Amino acid sequence: MGEEKKEASSRRDYVKAVGAGVVGLAVGAAIGYGAAPKAAPGAVTTVTETKTVTAPGAPAEGRKVSIYTYFEAYEQEGYMPLLIDMTGLDISTWTESTGTVMARLISEKAAPVADIVWGLSDWALEVLKEENAITKPDQPPTNVDKIDPKLTDPDGVWFGLGYWTAPMGVFHTKRAAEKGLTMPKSWWDLTDPKWKGEIIMPNPKTSGTATMMLTGAMILFGEEKGWEFFDKLVPNCAQITPSGSAPGKLAQTGEVALGLTFDYQTVKSKEAGYPVEIWVPEEGVAVNIHGAAIINRAKNPGNAWKVLQAALSKPMMEQYYISGSWLKISRTDVGLPEELAAAHPVWKWLIENHKLIPNYDYKWVAKNRERLLDEWTKRYGV
């Protein structure tokens, strides 16, 4: 299973805690499990989870839509009842990691099975766009003018929903004081030899969080200086973990002074009461935009459009916060719901105080990601 899904899974308990006390949307729906959508000849057919959700009282004919997604099951439990209520469709979903969803859509593009991809990383959507596997809708969603133009495809082929960020850090104040270390300010502060053995970071080959660190450094500093940064950072690391959440979890218990992780993990560690602070680098962090797009040659393009319209709606955007604990939503008129802000002040603080790398370019990431990962392995052997 892809690391994006593992890292999303690490948010599950936090999301449940976030949702506690928040009044949910009471929508009647029958939820069951069924067979996967029939794949086209030669298509990738490995299925990890397929869920069929039926709109109450809706006839089967003319109401079908097939969705591919990397949204975790616990997120879908919050999104799907609202989607059914807004569209009245019979919905089947196929869930996997970003890379697997992308590969399957490319393999099926001559005879698509899915009608829409809802929840996929920006760089993967760019690859699908180049492959002509997704298409610009004949009519744009009516609420597209509410989407921040920096968080969506300027060509209108795919549409941004919201984002998460990395790297951020869990800084253990007691451990740091014992080692004579103070809160770092910049990315480059982490390369000082005084940090040797006091940093844990994830592995870009297995972690979406670390891949964002890698591509972010290259965009922020240029490739020559970017590799110089990692040449100095890697020797300072006590561990390089497969998981993006593990460094934060190890740092929160004082294993090291600083664990490099993603935004939600820093909030979890802080709100759990550990003696930690959140490190947010002054230069900014890399961003991963969740997006949605209609599949080219989809069998049910009209129903796919209805899903896209609902996915960009204000009620659904609020649900992304409630069920997914995203850092930022793409609609400019939707903020963290008041109940969540009151219950989770650390989360509210991070939303208000993080900074994105000014020139982070997901199109560049789409073209260069695999090359950078290969170079990482050559240099560091992990």
Image (spheres, grey):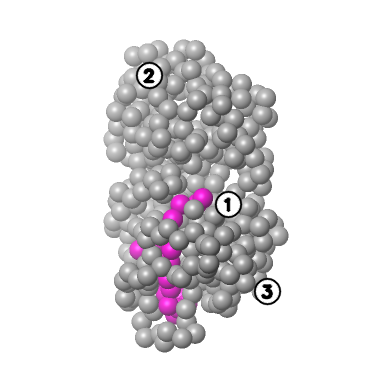
Secondary structure of the residue carrying numbered label 2: helix
Q: Callout 3: few (<14), some (14-19), or many (20+) C-alpha neighbours within 10 Å?
A: few
Looking at the image, can residue 313 be seen?
Answer: no
Q: Callout 1: few (<14), some (14-19), or many (20+) C-alpha neighbours within 10 Å?
A: many
Q: Alpha-carbon distance for marks 2 and 1? A: 38 Å
The residue singled out by tag 2 in the image is: 176
Q: Residue 138, labelled with which disc?
A: 3
Q: Residue 124, labelled with which disc?
A: 1
Q: Alpha-carbon distance for marks 1 and 3? A: 22 Å
The answer to the question of whether label 3 and label 2 lie on touching residues, with beta carbons closer than 8 A, is: no
Kind of residue at disc 3: Asp
Q: Nearer the viewer, residue 88 or 182?
A: 88
Looking at the image, can residue 181 be seen?
Answer: yes
Earlier residue among tags 2 and 1: 1
In the rendered image, the vertical position of residue 15 relative to residue 250, given as above or below: below
Kind of residue at disc 1: Ala
